[in-house]
Amino acid sequence: MAETMRAQVFYEKEKMSLEEVAVPEIGADDVLVKVKDVGICGSDISYYFGMSPLGTDSGKGPMVLGHEFTGIVAKVGKIPATKGLFKEGDRVVVNPVQHCNACPACASGNTHTCQNLSVPGVTTDGGFAEYCVSNYTGLFKLPDNVSFQAGAMTEPLACAVNGMNKLDIEPGQFVTVIGPGAIGMMMVQIARAYGAGKVALVGTRDYRLEKGREYGADYLFNTKDEKSPYYAKDLKEALADVTHGRLAERVIVPAGPNEAFETGVEIAGETGIIVHFGLPDEGAVFKIPALSFHTMDKQIRSAWLAPMVWPQTIRMVEEGLVELESLVTHVRPLEETGQAIVDLRNRVDDPMKVEIEM
Ligand SMILES: [Zn+2]
Ligand SMILES: [Zn+2]
């Protein structure tokens, strides 16, 4: 095996360089993964532009970003080898949120709030490199019929599945998704799989909304662009029209801005459940009309990360309940990682999901 590899080393705001570095050593409980495909996440954009600190002790680089990835097992540490869990050549996907399995949060099943999380691409070197180290407990085998490209979206899909589980959809219900990004497209498909009667997708860009129709959205609403054929000046009224006045029984908001969530609460009908999913800005505060919230008996839930849903998520892809490949609109080589992050932020050429492929 090679002793050096190419890696995109991130130093500070907008400073990342392709370097030849040593292939990382693995510990007894690690597995070395030869990376195949890595998705660029919104959080990679935040790190790259210095909007949020890294998860390292100093909050700074140098570190390799990238946490949504698939690959092939290149070396197996002593513990997983003894247990017969993985062997060289296995196709795998990494759950980057790697919990300690020893703290009270882990012991109670709330692994996503573990006090000792280790996250490749956030706290340790990640996937924008030819090789990456993962703890064996964060590794899952990729089913034969799932491509490396599709598999690299397992992490965001697992988060979407966790959010949709919290929505508690009952068969036939009217579900509204606010935020037609890649995660929104996954949520539309999950809503269908969970037996939603009708699904509405709400956003501000027609090219994204129309993509949602391909994944099973029945109604599209553009709340911003007056020239759009889907323009809804008053979203609540538009929803009342198509639900016989009942409004949305279930609402999930993958969009980040506060207003999107506040809209979500407003358009939920009586006894509706609203799941907050998109990451808010630091210091953001919700404003919700309290009386109608109370008398309409609505429920608000949050959905953070993806505790305990990885096996279910992988099965959903394997069984074709969620189609991921067509969400990848751009594939770039490792050399272009920095530019790919910049282009994604500037939405060059209408991107949905952008991946780096080795
Ligand atoms: Zn991510
Ligand atoms: Zn823990």
Image: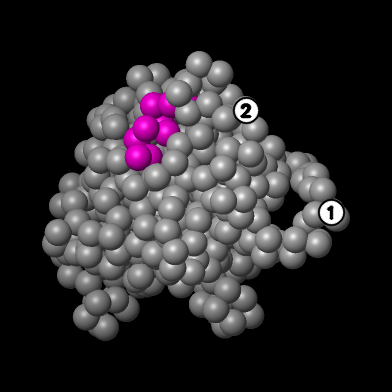
When the figure is inspected, residue 98 is found, relative to residue 125, above or below; the finding is: below
At label 1, the amino acid type is Ala
Q: Is residue 157 left or right of residue 303?
A: left
SS for callout 2: loop
Provide the residue designation for mark 1: 290
Task: In this rendered view, identify the residue nearer to me: 198 or 66.
Answer: 198
Q: Tell me if the residue at label 1 has its CB under 8 Å from ligand 1.
A: no
SS for callout 1: helix
Q: CA distance from mark 1 to mark 2?
A: 24 Å
Residue 163 placement (x, y as % from top left): 52, 60
Q: How many marks?
A: 2
Name the quarter where the C terminus is drawn: top left
Residue interval drawn in magenta: 204-213
Residue 339 placement (x, y as % from top left): 38, 22
At label 2, the amino acid type is Lys
Q: Specify the principal SS of the magenta part.
A: helix
Residue 233 disc label: 2
User: Image point 81% across, 61% down: which residue?
Assistant: 294
User: Image point 80% across, 44% down: which residue?
Assistant: 287
* Residue most extreme to the right: 291
When the figure is inspected, residue 256 is found, relative to residue 172, above or below; the finding is: above
Q: Nearer the viewer, mark 1 or mark 2?
A: 2
Q: Is residue 338 visible?
A: no
Task: In this rendered view, identify the residue nearer to me: 234 or 63.
Answer: 234
Q: Tell me if the residue at label 2 has its CB under 8 Å from ligand 1.
A: no
